[in-house]
Each structure stands twice: as C-alpha cells, then as structure tokens.
Amino acid sequence: MATGIKDKVAIVGMGCSKFGERWDSGPEELMVEAYLEAMQDAGIEPTQIDAAWFSTHIDDIGTGKGGTPLSLALRLPNIAVTRVENFCASGSEALRGAVYAVASGACDIALAVGVEKLKDTGYGGLPVGNMGTLNPQWSPSGSAPGNFAQLASAYRAKHGVAKEDLKRAIAHVSVKSHANGAKNPKAHLRNEVSEEQVMNAPMIAEPLGLFDCCGVSDGAAAAIVTTPEIAKAMGKKDVVTVKAMQLSVSNGLESQHNSWDGSYFHTARIAAKKAYKEGGIDNPREQVSMMEVHDCFSITELVTMEDLFISPEGGAVKDVMDGFYDSDGKVPCQIDGGLKCFGHPIGASGLRMAYEMYLQLQGRAGERQLPNPKIGLTHNLGGAPSQNVCSVTIIGAEGA
C-alpha cells in the first residue's frame, strides 16, 4: 500500500534569482543565477546530480522546448532532464518530479529548476496560450481578472459579506503583502502601500483594483533534493524534509455542473485534505506555521484561506482583518511578498514559494525571519476558478 513521502526526502539546497524586469538577462542567465545559489547552498558538484526536472510554461516565447534549455544553460553532465508544464503550478510540478524520484529510490540527488521570461514579449499580461480545442466553448471571452472577479462576487453572495467589507479585506491582503515584500531584496515590487491607496486604485474588474492584481515578471528558482540519510552524511544540520505533495486537477465538475457555486476552489480543498493526511496534520490552523499561497489576485488569497481549512467557512474576512495572516499574526502568509510583490514568472513561482519556506525553516530569512517556524505550506494554482490545477506542498523540520 502507498505510504506517502513524509520525511523520505530532504531539501539540501535552494536558489532564487532576483525577480523583476530583467531586460539584461535571458532565461539562461536566470536559470544559472538560481542554480549556482542552490549548488553553493547544497555544497555539491554537478557530477553528483542524477537527474533534473525543468519547468517552464510558455516555452515558445524564447526558453525553448524539451530538456535541452536547462542542460545547455547549466552544462549538466548528460543526465536525464524532464521538462514539465502544468499551467501556473509548473514550478511545483518540477519539484514534485524531483522529490518523487528520490523517494522512489531512482535517484540519490535530483534537481528542480523553474524559469519564465515574460517581460520581453511585448504583452502587458500573461500571453494567451492554447487551452485546447474546447476552450472556445467553455470560456470564449474570459480574462484572468474577470474570472477572479466572479470568484469575489460568488463568495460575497454566498456568505452575505457587504461589498465594502470584502473590498477592505482584500485591500488588507495586498497591504500586508507589500509590507512584507518591501523587506525582500529579491522581490520585483518593494514599495509599501496604504489601505486607502488600494481602495482608491483604478478598477480592473470589479471589485479588483490595480493593487489587487499581481504583475508579470522574469525569474527563476531551483531546488536540490536527496534522502535525509545522504543529507546528514553531507554534514547538513537542521534538515528540512518534505512532508507532503499533492496535486488535484479539475475534471469538469466546476464548469459543467451546478453543484459548484463559484465561491471556492474545489481542487484546492481536495489537494489540501490529501496533503494534510499525508503529512500527518490534524489541525492546520494550529499546526501550520506559515504559508505561501497563489495570490494571483487578492481575492484568491482570501478564498484560499478557507480552502486550506485555516479559516472556517465564511470566516476568512474576519481573520484577514484581525491580522491573523500578517507577519506578526498566528499564521503569516506571503512573508516574502508573494506573487503580489514577486510577479508571476509561471515556471518559477511554485519553486519560489518553497524557497521562502526553506529559508524560514533554516532561520536564514534575514529581516523577514519568523520566530521558530516548524511547518511551511505552499499552495500553487493554475488556471481559473472553473478549470484549474492546484498543488499543495508541505515542508518542515525533520520530525516535526
């Protein structure tokens, strides 16, 4: 019977490029930047890496197809490189591939790298991708802000939240993330904003204003994983292990059946339940120390708090306004600034989330450091509320 991966895999090195408008760098330079930091952190040589997983979403823009872009950029020693893509959860998918390879015994040491170079496309938002032959039938005129604005409307209607209260709560989400991102030298946007600035910003798709939407950026992140036994033999202290990795993908229920009311993410709740079971977490509100979630829009973060069973059903607005998810709250969220301040280079985002949790668990987050965290959770979402893929990853101190 399947026993899960809890504490079977250790993260021994991670790296993250500076995110932003990296006009001076191509995807190759961004990958090298993240990789070299991860290799120095791990203290290994390239010849020790058995296999690699490489994530990039919009390959045709310039990064390229297949595994060769990674192998060429990093001069890997002719090892297996698998390119993975799963919408905005691609970075988490690369990490999952590397983690599963080690957990299965197929590899001693595996590498995961994610990258996306979006600022050179000449397109203001995410370029439009081919979603499949039936997408024109499902969403002929959909847009990302419009889709997530509908999430806000559905949530407000279901829980009887006043329009002004919801708007102020999602404004607080953005204010909190910007305050955190201002302390992070690798973030794209490092400016603090006030609640009134967010409330009065230009409207993009009601109720989502300018500061409720994450931006587009360039960036890369990397992870090196092995077994806890090898990690200790390498002299690693305070070993960080993977507790759970779960992925849930829409099957048509949300878009084709009226049992879904549009106010939550069906896949997130499934992935969260499975991850908690795999990771041995019975009470996430008490046991999870910190989170990085997929805040493509501020409403997404607020709804996700309930989908992850941290806030009770309909209770996220109160928790957000009470500061429960602030940097000094009970469960800090987006302590590095999140997508809101990093932007969203698609193939890198999931690994960037894990990078912050890893630094925090090792006490290496500098000005952002939280007091004694034990369990970190990342939530990486791709697609729209009605059709998506959701990854939930839990990492923590060994034995926690």
Image (cartoon, rainbow, N blue to C red):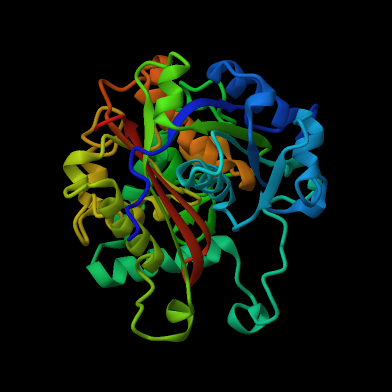
Q: Residue at x 72, y 56 (%)?
A: 127
Q: Nearer the viewer, residue 270 or 339?
A: 270
Can see residue 388? yes
Res. 299 image quadrant = bottom left
The answer to whether residue 209 is left or right of residue 39 is: left
On the question of residue 26 being in view, the answer is no
Q: Position of residue 26 (x, y in %)?
A: 80, 33
Give the camera-side residue of 383 and 396: 396
Q: Position of residue 30 (x, y in %)?
A: 71, 30
> Residue at the spot x=33%, y=62% of the render?
269
Q: How many marks?
A: 0
Quadrant where the image shows the C terminus: top left
Classify 251 as above or below 63. Answer: below
Residue at x-position 49% and y-position 47%:
100
Q: Quadrant of the N terminus?
A: bottom left
* Relative to 63, 386 lies left or right: left
- Rendered position, 284 above or below 79: below
Query: Residue 108 at x, y = what percent?
Result: 54, 34
284 or 162, which lies in front? 284
> Which residue is at 37% across, 68% downward?
266
Is 218 drawn above or below residue 274 in the view shown? above
Q: Residue 295: horizontal and vertical position, in percent?
A: 46, 48
